[in-house]
Amino acid sequence: NDQIAAASLKHPIVLLDKGQLYKYGTAGFRMNADLLEGVTFRVGLLAALRSRKLNSQAIGVMITASHNPAVDNGVKIVDPMGDMLEQDWERFATALVNAPSDEELVELYNRLATDLKIDLKIPAKVIYGRDTRPSGHKLVTALAGALDATSTEHVDYKLLTTPQLHYLVRATNSEGTPLSYGKVSEVGYYEKLASALVRALKGKKINGTLTVDCANGVGGPKLHEFLKYIPKDKVSFDVKVVNDDVLRPEVLNLDCGADYVKTKQRAPPNTKTQPGARSCSYDGDADRIIYYWVDPETGFFMLDGDRISSLAASFIGDLVESAGLRDDIRIGVVQTAYANGASTNYITQHLKLPVTCTPTGVKHLHHVAQGFDIGVYFEANGHGTVLFSPDALDYFRNKAPQSPAQKDALDTLVALGDLINQTVGDAISDMLLVEVILAHKSWTLRDWAMTYADLPNRLVRVEVENKDLFQTTDAERRLASPEGAQDEIDNAVKKYKDARSFARASGTENACRVYAEAATRSEANELAERVARIIE
Ligand code: NG1
Ligand code: ZN
């Protein structure tokens, strides 16, 4: 106890203005890095408790603020199988971080241990990594301080993408078991992906050059590193890496990266995107990806998370069909309300696969996807992955093929299970998945884009006095309060063809968001503005 109090003195919490509290949200704690030293120390205390609660399994801590500006940072906890911290524990994180003094912090730490029946004498292990933000060093020191003070074994993996840390947590906890996830090292991650890429391609060629914008974040050096592991005699993959400057912190996410491309709907101005060239952008911690090209005739065209989701679902659906397993393997697609309605129609009507809608936030999508044999989930912003249940993978591995075509399909499914990060959305892994599918289909981005036409849509941010008044139901698609607001929205929507609109409080910003889609661009804009006026 004395040790915790003494260490906490070195990493003090900055008390927020009266009435304001830190909150463990969708992205953990994320804010200006100056506020985060004490926060990170306290997150370390919770990670140690969590490891002890879960029989000494390794817990991960990632230090990143993803697509936020360079002055921000963030800290979040990764559970033993590589998924996000169990929702129930978010409030413990919030409570520890808001303890007003060192004494009260120690008291709360002990109370949590008692209430949760945690044996503080058993071993604990925490592993961690950080993105390229300069403030990462200071935060890692605070984290290590908490782990030392609680006699927790810890491993500093230094610079990592967020999904690499998730990989390492799962690999650490599954090492030596029948469900081993791979070698417990960064090299193990590259080797696993490179080997899976070769097997998934099955000799198909990746055409042309892919330009990858790394948002000047940690994805840059990690992508360069990964490329060295691709066996050049088996696969030729021509990648041009741009925006990979991690020496000047101020350029991180500046006018580039997946978030810029998705929200501005244009290519990063500094990359001089060649007409027709296949391009993609990662975000600052490389857990999101957006594809696009600039057409000489029609201009910029973006292939976002919805497009990757439908591409993956279509390819995997065909493989399951070719493997003769249509009736044995349940494939499902999980989206949020922000998914373009045209993608939902394409998946349900053309691919004939079920779509489930969940609230915003990857943890919700991940959870529902786990309920399928193969669960495809993506947020429109480019964060997502495809989950294969252990039973499905076993089935693919052990099923005796009746024909060469069936064998090919089964082998490819097994390779995809290794190629696709099973813990969390991963820009490098998702990029390889897209490249494999395009190679198999001999498709350009234009062919991919032709599968369906997006409904014109508009997303607006609305400042409101108190966003907490906006409570939703039906996976955030309807407002339960303020009273009457939903009726007004329904009336507005009725005036337009093929229209849909909803309003909800943002989980990451102090504002509401309104989304609208309709048959034409002007109608979508008009509807969004109408609904914005209803809620402001
Ligand atoms: P909020 O601020 O709750 O809308 C945003 C994104 C989510 C998700 C989270 C976490 C939109 C409309 N919302 O959530 O998709 O990625 O941030 O980063 O893009
Ligand atoms: Zn991110």
Image (cartoon, grey):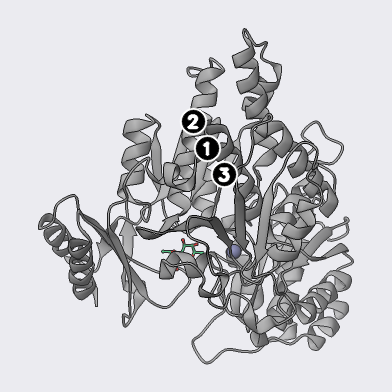
Q: Position of residue 176 (x, y in %)?
A: 87, 37
Q: Earlier in the sequence, mark 3 or mark 1?
A: 1
The C terminus is located in which quarter? Answer: bottom left
Q: Quadrant of residue 138?
A: bottom right
Q: Residue at x 47, y 47 (%)?
A: 445
Residue that label 3 marks = 434
Binning the other alpha carbons within 10 Å of mark 3 as few (below 14), some (14 to 19) or many (20 upward) gives some
Say which of 369 and 23 sits in front.
369
Q: Give the number of the disc on residue 375.
A: 1
Amino acid at the residue labelled 2: Ile
Residue that label 2 marks = 331
Amino acid at the residue labelled 1: Gly
Taking the image as shown, residue 370 lies to the left or right of residue 346, namely right
Q: Are marks 2 and 1 in contact (CB under 8 Å)?
A: yes
Q: CA distance from mark 3 to mark 2?
A: 18 Å
Say which of 256 and 274 sits in front.
274
Q: Quadrant of residue 323?
A: top right
Task: Give the tally of numbered discs.
Answer: 3
Q: Secondary structure at mark 1?
A: strand
